[in-house]
Amino acid sequence: MPIFWECDRCTACCRWPGQVRLTDADVTRIAAYLQLTEAEFIQGHTRINAQRNGLALLDQADGACGFLDSGGNCRIQPVKPHQCSDFPNRWNFPGFEKVCRAKPVEVSAEEWERRINAPPNPFAPLDANPLLTADKPLLPPSEKNR
Ligand code: SF4
Ligand code: SF4
């Protein structure tokens, strides 16, 4: 039976060193969710990745992801990058269980597919507006300095 790793929301993977790389589809989806243009999102929330061949999310001063809020929640949870939603089921690294609290659950192949393709958070509707609910408002760069 396949193993599905159930995320415990410990947020360790949002805090450890590294980068959250973005696909073009991630950029389009996240910008739309934040009600920003893609250019505004790229300018305000991303940097060139370490490989210099694409984009990654900005970090906070302590190295945590820029979208991790003070309550330990991802502010783009329903549309988070594939690098985030794919871990640790579609990718991981040797020994990841020592730093990730996801629980291994045996499921059928059909159930594994259903779970891996489910929205990251079925309780967070896509029309939830983080501009209204975030503890730090996510404003376009042009509005940050007003
Ligand atoms: S985008 Fe969300 S899930 Fe991904 S590292 Fe940042 S806070 Fe964590
Ligand atoms: S994937 Fe693992 S490290 Fe990341 S939040 Fe879930 S349990 Fe924690």
Image (tube, grey):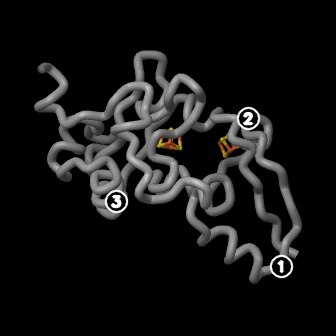
> In terms of depth relative to the viewer, which is nearer, 132 or 22?
132
Going from N to C along the chain, the mark reached first, 1 or 3, is: 3
Viewport quadrant of the C terminus: top left
Between discs 2 and 1, the one toward the N terminus: 2
Q: Amino acid at mark 2?
A: Val
Residue 103 appears anywhere in the view: yes
Calculate the distance from the C-alpha at mark 1 to the C-alpha at mark 3.
30 Å
- The residue beneath circle 1 is 108
Q: Circle 2 sits on which residue?
A: 99
Foreground label between 3 and 2: 3
Say which element carries label 1. Answer: loop
Residue shown at 52%/29% (left/top)? 17
SS at badge 2: loop
Q: Quadrant of residue 56?
A: top left
What residue did someone put label 3 on? 29
Which badge, 3 or 2, is on the more N-terminal residue? 3
Q: Is residue 50 visible?
A: no
Residue 110 location, x and y as percent?
75, 83
